[in-house]
Image (cartoon, rainbow, N blue to C red):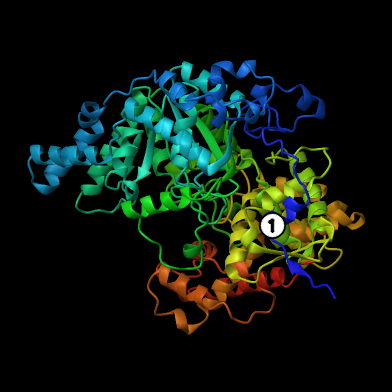
Amino acid sequence: MLKSKKIMIENLFNENSLDQKLNINLSNLKQPLGGCVSCKLCETSQRRRTKSENITATVEENFIDVLDFSKFDGVKNIHKLTSINTKVLPSLWFADFKYVFRHGLNHEYPSVMEKVIMSKRVYKAMEEEVTRSGNTLAYVKKKVLNYFYEMKASLSKFICRCCAYGLYKIFRKLMKSLLVCPRQMEKIKEAEKTGIPIIYLPLHRSHLDYLLITWIVWHWDIRLPHIASGDNLNLTGFGWLLRATGAFFIRRKINPEDSGGNDALYRAVLHSYMTEILKSGMSLEFFLEGTRSRFGKSLLPKNGLISNVYEAVTEEGVNDVYLVPVSYSYDKTVEGIFMNELMGHKKKRESILGVFMGVWNVLKLTEQCGNVRVTFGTPTLLSEYLNAMKNNIEESIELNYPATPHSYRELLPWHDANTPRRTIIRAVGFHIIYDATFQSSISVTSLISSILLCQYRNGAKLSDVGETFLELASDITNKGFDIVGYEPDSEFSYTLLKEGFQHIGKCVNITGEPDTDIENYNVSIKESQAAYIELAYNKNGIVHIFMIESALALAYVSSPLGTSKNDIVNIALIICSTLRFEAVFCKPCENLRKKVEKIYDQFIATESEDYFISKKVIYCSNILRPFLQTLYIVLKALYSTNYTTIKTDTLFIRKVLSDVSGKYQFNIFQESFNSDSVHNSLKLLRAKEIILSSQFKINNEDEALSLQRFLEFILNSKDSV
């Protein structure tokens, strides 16, 4: 009798002669991307192109591989290309070298040291420090100079040119392609010509993010940005190189209650440094999320640096700035995922040896990152954001509302009563994070990972995975998203599955009988927590697409038949509120209830007659289910006396994750045991005052019991077809 055997991913797809190439350059959306309809920031919203529009779209309206620019001398010759597939163009001898050293760096980057030291803000901070400490003005000025030299960039055109050449080699080693839409870059070029400084606000997934924007804008002869970097990267030698390419270093932690005055002085220097860069017409780049995403989804914004920009424009003589949301789509990040951190292990500190070892290990691999796509949003003036937010938020949503348990208003964390003067800028930050998230292209790896976790946790035939992939891909593109390599209305090809599975091969088993057709092979997830966490990291790249549908699906499958629309919508709103530290469910200019009701009519109301919709309800319910399960795990742990002596979040998280064998009323997904979700659960419990800061025991029994009952009501629902 023939036995089923495990098949290597590469061997399986190679044996079946899958030579068809994916059209990774195609964009299914109108370019450049539109803006927000709700607050009228732009005239049009992001929408899918029709089939005829795809046929007539020019090279500039699709994505082009920047790694091939040296083959045809770059931007000035894009209009001469007859195909978006530049891989077929011949490579000439020394093409990279000639391209790099012919290509200009035509902008100036003047020093702002004197302007910073002499600024009113810094001078006032120095006077206050002299009065407080009794030190001389010369001593305090020396301290200010030390702060300035500690943070400043030292941008060198020669070093930038050398790095541009080196990055050609490194990026080709790490990536199959680096895709950028010329039409998006033309909009940024037009914005730069106005003389108004540009601020790039990318989502943060990888250390490569620091390099990509600078390298890409250089090709279009756009001014290189000054990049805010954490001082953990200011390592011997490496820090010097980053400074020379535009990085300035800021301390990871600034104490706002510092009684010694050092932080007040440091903050004044940092604020003035950013302001003077903008006054000089130079660009900035910083990550609103503040750090790399540990679990593959967007983080809530940190408002410190964007507040500096806001004050520079409204109070300190910067006329205006353009804000550009930027997002990245990696098949796999160069660092891999943060497996040790997600499983609760101690984070390793950055070191110069660690950097070199990391680079060495990565360069031993080939095309680790797969196809990388960088999406630039349409440049929008900060003044337009401020006017739009002010007009929409203040007219439609009460700002100073009382904290109400389970109120959907609690979903809007920019309404912070403790810092009312930050309301508008908080709203801008959330709007930009939302925009950047929703403009990002979706990788095939993310979609396949979501199918395995949310639809086929117990395994399936490849034909079933392929069928579900096609159904969901069509749904996603109809919603106005791009999937890298997927062409709507085209025949399904197993090449799409090959593209995704090659990045998650160590997480799955593929088995089948010898000589079996490819569609009859079985695929299942390996029984290890690491496999589930890695797939969840990838799956989280599509959470934003289905998060409202997921909340509705959870409400629907947990409610008795015949439950009214209003009740299901109310339950979905409570789920959104409960998970407000996991995702941004709506823009600050949107009415969440109306949004949920609209999606209910499109989704749940048609469920009964359509098998695909029925499958999709289960699929969607499992998108957000793990986050609620983590919250339940944390809440149950807090009832235990084993945690009352713990003093820090880190120790609590490690102890919770070390006990994965607890007994619960329902099936717990393995990916629910991760440090990121536990950390966000603690944030929610403190926001609800169920626990107090730095304490790990129940403070409000009634609120805790109410939340526990709600979670049990939701999580006892079915999670599979």
Give the labeled residue for mark 1. Answer: 9
Residue 356 on image: x %, y %:
37, 50
The front one of 424 and 333 is 333
- Quarter in which the C terminus is drawn: bottom right
Residue 193 at least partly seen: yes
Nearer to me, 35 or 72: 72
Residue at 21% over, 48% down:
262
Q: Of the residues shown, which amino acid type is indicated by label 1?
A: Ile
Quadrant of the image occupied by residue 516: bottom right
Residue 570 seen in the figure: no
Q: Secondary structure at mark 1?
A: helix
Residue 718, horizontal then vertical, whole percent? 77, 69
Q: Quadrant of residue 531?
A: bottom right
578 displayed left or right of 94: right
* Horizontal side, residue 310 vs residue 625: left or right: left
Identify the residue at horizontal 82%, vertical 38% (top origin). 490
Whole-percent x and y of residue 618?
A: 78, 61
189 up-or-down from 130: above or below: above
| Mark 1 residue crowding within 10 angstroms, few (<14) / some (14–19) / many (20+) | some
Residue 351, position as x, y percentages in the image? 32, 54
Residue 350 vs 138, above or below: the answer is below
